[in-house]
Image (spheres, rainbow, N blue to C red):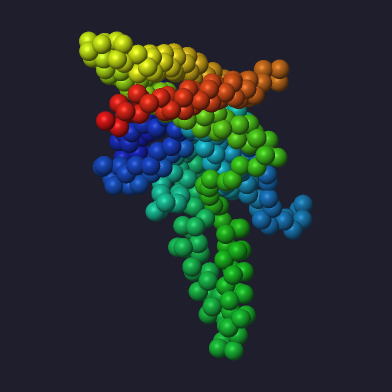
C-alpha cells in the first residue's frame, strides 16, 4: 500500500507516493507545487553550530545542522541538508527508520521544507516554520544582502564590490536556516553506498533478465512455427517420392532436431532466469527491510555466479543457431 500525501495548505489529497518513493505534484485546489521523498534513513548526522558565542555569562545563539541520506524503495539516494534554530536535537529520527519528507517546489528545486514523518515510530515533525531551500533563499531574500554590499562600494572598487557581495551572500546563507535536497553520487567508501551500488546492479540485472525472457519466448514461438513449415515441406517431398529427396529430407530432420533442442534449452533458460529474478527480488526486499543480511549469506555473488552459468547456456544456443544457419534447407525456407 502506497503512502498518501495531503496538501498542508488546504488539506486536499495530493496523491500517493510512487513505488520508487518519489512524488512531484500540483494541488488541484490551491495550485501549489509539492514534492515528497520516502525511504530508509541510511545515513544521519546532527551537529550543533554556534552562531554567536561570546562567553558563558552572555547569551549565545546556536543552530543545528542535519544531514539525512534517504535510500528510496527505487534504490535512488537523496541527500537532505537543513538547519533548525536552537541547540537541541528536535527531529525524532534515527538510522534505518522509514521516513518521508514533504516540501514545496520552485521549478525543479526545493522551495521550502514542510514536514518530516517517521513511519517507523509514527512520529511526525511539523517544522515551526517552513525552512526555505538554499537556492530559493539566495534568489529572493539573499539578493538584499548583495544589494547592500554593492551599495557600499564606489566605481573604483569593482573587485572589492564583488568580494563584499560574495561574502554577504555566504554569511547570509550561514546565518539563516536553509534546506537543500540533492541526488549525490554513490561512493564505495561511504557506509551503505557500496551495498546500494550492489543492489542497483542487481536491479539492472532484473530488468535485463525480464527482457531476455520475453525475447526467448518470442523466439520459441518463431522456432515452433519454423518446425511446422519444415515439417510441411518434408511432407510434400515424401508425397512426391522419398527416394528423390533423401538427402534434403535428412537435412530437414536434422534442422527440426536442432530447433527442438534449441526450444528445450530456451525453455530451461526461461525457467532459470525466472528463478534468478525471484532470487533478486528476495535479496532486494530483504536488504531494504533489514540493515544488512548476515555476512555468510552473500547472495549477490551467488546470483552473479548463476548468471555466469546461464551465459554459458546462451553461448551453446548460439552455436546451435550457427549450425542451423549452415543447413541448406533452413536457408532455402528462410529466404524463400
Q: Give residue 171's position: percent from left, percent from top.
A: 61, 63
Residue drawn 49% across the image and 42% down it: 127
Left or right of 199 on screen, residue 141: left
Residue drawn 59% across the image and 89% down it: 156
Q: Quadrant of the N terminus?
A: top left
Q: Quadrant of the C terminus?
A: top left
Residue drawn 53% across the image and 74% down it: 148
Of residues 152 and 236, the one nearer the viewer is 236
Residue drawn 30% across the image and 26% down it: 333
Left or right of 235 on screen, residue 166: right
Of residues 69 and 326, the one nearer the viewer is 326
Q: Give residue 31's position: percent from left, percent from top.
A: 29, 47
Q: Quadrant of residue 223?
A: top left
Of residues 290 and 134, the one nearer the viewer is 290
Q: Give residue 45's position: percent from left, percent from top.
A: 65, 40
| Residue 55 in view in this figure | yes
Q: Give residue 80's position: percent from left, percent from top.
A: 55, 44
**Relative to 112, is 242 above or below?**
above
Q: Residue furthest bottom?
A: 156
Left or right of 95 on screen, residue 335: left
Q: Residue furthest front?
A: 243
| Residue 59 in view in this figure | no
Of residues 326 and 237, the one nearer the viewer is 237
Amino acid at each position: 500500500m502506497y503512502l498518501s500525501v495531503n496538501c498542508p495548505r488546504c488539506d486536499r489529497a495530493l496523491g500517493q507516493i510512487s513505488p520508487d518513493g518519489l512524488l512531484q505534484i500540483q494541488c488541484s485546489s490551491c495550485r501549489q507545487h509539492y514534492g515528497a521523498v520516502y525511504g530508509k534513513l541510511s545515513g544521519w548526522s546532527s551537529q550543533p553550530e554556534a552562531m554567536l558565542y561570546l562567553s558563558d555569562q552572555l547569551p549565545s545563539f546556536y543552530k543545528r545542522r542535519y544531514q539525512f541520506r534517504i535510500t528510496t524503495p527505487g534504490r535512488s539516494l537523496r541527500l537532505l541538508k537543513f538547519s533548525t534554530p536552537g541547540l537541541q536535537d528536535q527531529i525524532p529520527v534515527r538510522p534505518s527508520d522509514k521516513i518521508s519528507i514533504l516540501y514545496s517546489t520552485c521549478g525543479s528545486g526545493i522551495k521550502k521544507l514542510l514536514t518530516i514523518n517517521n513511519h517507523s515510530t509514527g512520529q511526525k515533525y511539523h517544522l515551526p516554520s517552513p525552512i526555505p531551500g538554499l537556492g530559493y533563499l539566495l534568489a529572493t531574500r539573499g539578493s538584499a544582502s548583495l544589494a547592500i554590499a554593492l551599495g557600499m562600494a564606489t566605481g573604483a572598487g569593482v573587485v572589492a564590490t564583488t568580494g563584499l557581495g560574495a561574502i554577504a551572500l555566504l554569511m547570509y546563507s550561514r546565518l539563516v536556516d536553509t534546506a537543500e535536497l540533492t541526488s549525490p553520487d554513490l561512493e564505495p567508501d561511504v557506509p551503505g553506498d557500496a551495498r546500494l551500488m550492489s543492489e542497483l546492479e542487481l536491479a539492472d540485472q532484473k530488468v535485463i533478465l525480464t527482457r531476455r525472457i520475453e525475447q526467448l519466448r518470442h523466439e520459441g514461438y518463431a522456432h515452433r512455427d519454423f518446425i511446422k513449415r519444415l515439417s510441411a515441406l518434408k511432407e510434400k517431398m515424401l508425397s512426391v517420392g522419398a527416394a528423390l529427396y533423401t538427402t534434403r529430407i535428412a537435412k530437414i530432420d536434422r534442422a527440426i532436431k536442432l530447433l527442438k533442442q534449441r526450444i528445450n534449452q530456451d525453455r530451461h533458460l526461461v525457467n532459470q532466469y525466472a528463478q534468478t529474478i525471484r532470487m533478486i527480488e528476495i535479496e532486494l526486499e530483504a536488504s531494504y527491510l533489514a540493515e544488512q543480511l548476515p555476512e555468510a549469506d552473500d547472495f549477490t555473488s551467488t546470483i552473479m555466479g548463476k548468471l555466469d552459468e546461464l551465459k554459458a547456456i546462451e553461448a551453446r544456443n548460439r552455436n546451435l543457431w550457427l549450425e542451423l544457419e549452415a543447413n541448406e534447407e533452413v536457408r532455402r525456407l528462410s529466404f524463400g
